[in-house]
Amino acid sequence: MKSTGAVKTAKILVVDDEPEITEIIEAFLDNAGYSVKVENNPEQAIKLAKEIKPDLILLDIMMPGTDGYTICNRIKEDPALGNTPVIFLTGKDSKDDQGRSFQVGGDMFIKKPFSCERLLEIVNIVLLSVGRG
């Protein structure tokens, strides 16, 4: 069996209020072999997560209305989604944000801007660490 490094069956949900960011991430991760869904509305993201039950969620922290911390809390409280790994994406670089990311159940914290290659490495590591890779 040939390994390409990507987890071919993993479903990833990308949540960011900036469509240009979700489009880039979606295209790159899709090209790497992942099944990718995107949502630009934080409230709709929770609904979509319940529908598709992703293997991993990439979640922006700063969004209008509901922030990423609140979304993560709500996902982690849901029995069907509670074990889903969450990687926070943020333009902020505060240690407080990093700490809070982990307090609400985040698994990793990536500062924007980031390279798609680095994002892919982190996605692979997180999926492998939770046995979904």
Image (spheres, rainbow, N blue to C red):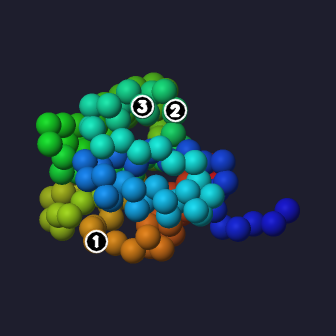
* Sooner in the amino-acid sequence: mark 1 or mark 3: 3
Residue 49, percent from left and from top: 43, 33
State whether residue 40 is above or below residue 98. above
Element marked by disc 2 = helix
Residue 129, percent from left and from top: 56, 56
Q: Amino acid at mark 2?
A: Ile
Report, in whole angstroms, how far the alpha carbon at label 1 lies from the one at label 3: 26 Å
Q: Amino acid at mark 1?
A: Pro
Question: What residue does disc 1 label?
Answer: 113
Q: Is residue 78 left or right of residue 9?
A: left
Q: Is residue 68 left or right of residue 1?
A: left
* Sooner in the amino-acid sequence: mark 2 or mark 1: 2
Disc sitting over residue 4 in the figure: none
Mark 3 packing: few (<14 Cα in 10 Å), some, or many (20+)? some
Can residue 61 be seen in the rendering of this structure?
A: yes
Picture residue at 42% right of the left edge, 60% below the top:
25
Question: What residue does disc 3 label?
Answer: 48
Report, in whole angstroms, how far the alpha carbon at label 3 lies from the one at label 2: 6 Å
Disc sitting over residue 52 in the figure: 2
Residue 33, percent from left and from top: 63, 58
